[in-house]
Amino acid sequence: MNTTTVSIETLERVMAMALRRHGASEIAASEVAKALRRAEQLGNTHCGLGHLERDCAQLLSGRVVGKAVPKMSRIRPGLIQVNARDGFAQPAFALGLPEALECVASLGVTVLAISRAYTCTALGYFPERIAENGFIGIAFTNASASVTAPGGSKPVLGTNPIAMSVPDGRGAMVFQFDQCTSAANLRHVREAAQRSEPIPQGWAVSPLGEPTTNASEALAGALLPAGGARGFGIGLMSEVLASFFTNSAMSLDTESLQTVYGPPHGLGVFCILLDPTAVAGDHFWHKLGRLKEAIDSQSGTRLPGTKQRAQECVTVDRAMWEKAQSLAESRFDNHAG
């Protein structure tokens, strides 16, 4: 692969400029670029630099409203809603987070519900920001329908990720994870179809509901939930919390997130903030330490997210980086609002 090394500061600056040039407000461009930068730091190129061109295209088409001004409401003492107004999820989260942190410090538990947002890309970015402030962060979101119910053949849910970050009480995180509730990431199936390669058994079914290893058949049919009925239950939970509770779009009603033209995504993000010591006090940290030791003491095991190291410079695909620079230098008429 033809690669180049770029500092994360340069990466963030260029991505923010590209987003602004395609119609994002200063605040939106800044907040989204931070999230894309973080994904790159953790080695998640698909949710970092690899997402930039699609973001810019959907800014131009109006699927994301680049200059949307999110509106925050404190619905109940421990419930904060931010309507993203069909804009990016990251500036909506940034608006609601300070209020949510104030609430959880006082109440011990708080919900931050983001409504009507463009896809949040890497969901783990949100609970990580919560954990950096010393609280447990759990997040749910939904996506366009691609996953069928066990025994079915038609998509009814998105890959509907769930993410969690747990602080260590000393300014860092003990572990974190961000995982979809489908047996496979939809992106991996698309990539296999583009290369005319088979996919593993158990990932998907054909339009007739039959197990398939043909990636193109899988795209015409549906993905399977991870772990069968158990994974489908978690996917349902994500849908209920992210879509129904926040009054956002259902997976059933959301066109493919890859599609440049079409209505705004309108998805939801449901975040729970918990004070880890609200009930257990310092016993929480003691038990967390015991669990970490029990896992770390076994060769070949680790807590999720513990091998991720934020780098000051990242190695990126040269063509992708050149495309990002081109997007940052280009000027377009914007009709995204």
Image (tube, grey):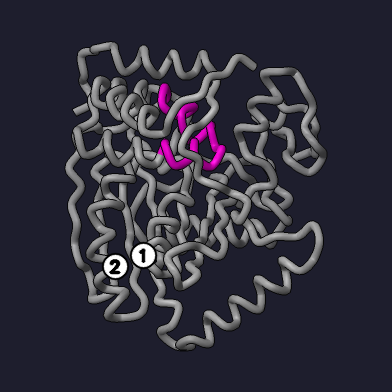
Q: The magenta stretch spans which residues?
A: 36-54
Compared to 275, does 188 lie above or below? above
Give whichever of discs 1 and 2 has the lower sequence position: 2
Q: Is residue 19 left or right of residue 244?
A: left
* Residue name at image x 41 percent, y 53 percent: 126
Magenta span includes 40? yes
In front of the other: 149 or 77: 77
- Find out whether the residues at labels 1 and 2 contact each other: C-beta distance under 8 Å: yes
In the rendering, at what x and y percent does residue 240 appear?
46, 60
Q: State whether residue 157 appears in this view.
A: no
Q: Secondary structure at mark 2?
A: helix
Q: Is residue 82 left or right of residue 164?
A: left
In the rendering, at what x and y percent does residue 333 appear?
20, 13
* Residue name at image x 79 percent, y 43 percent: 202
In the rendering, at what x and y percent does residue 107 appear?
30, 81
The residue carrying mark 2 is: 101
* Residue name at image x 36 percent, y 33 percent: 9
Q: Which mark is residue 133?
A: 1
| Residue type beneath disc 1 | Asn
Magenta span includes 144? no
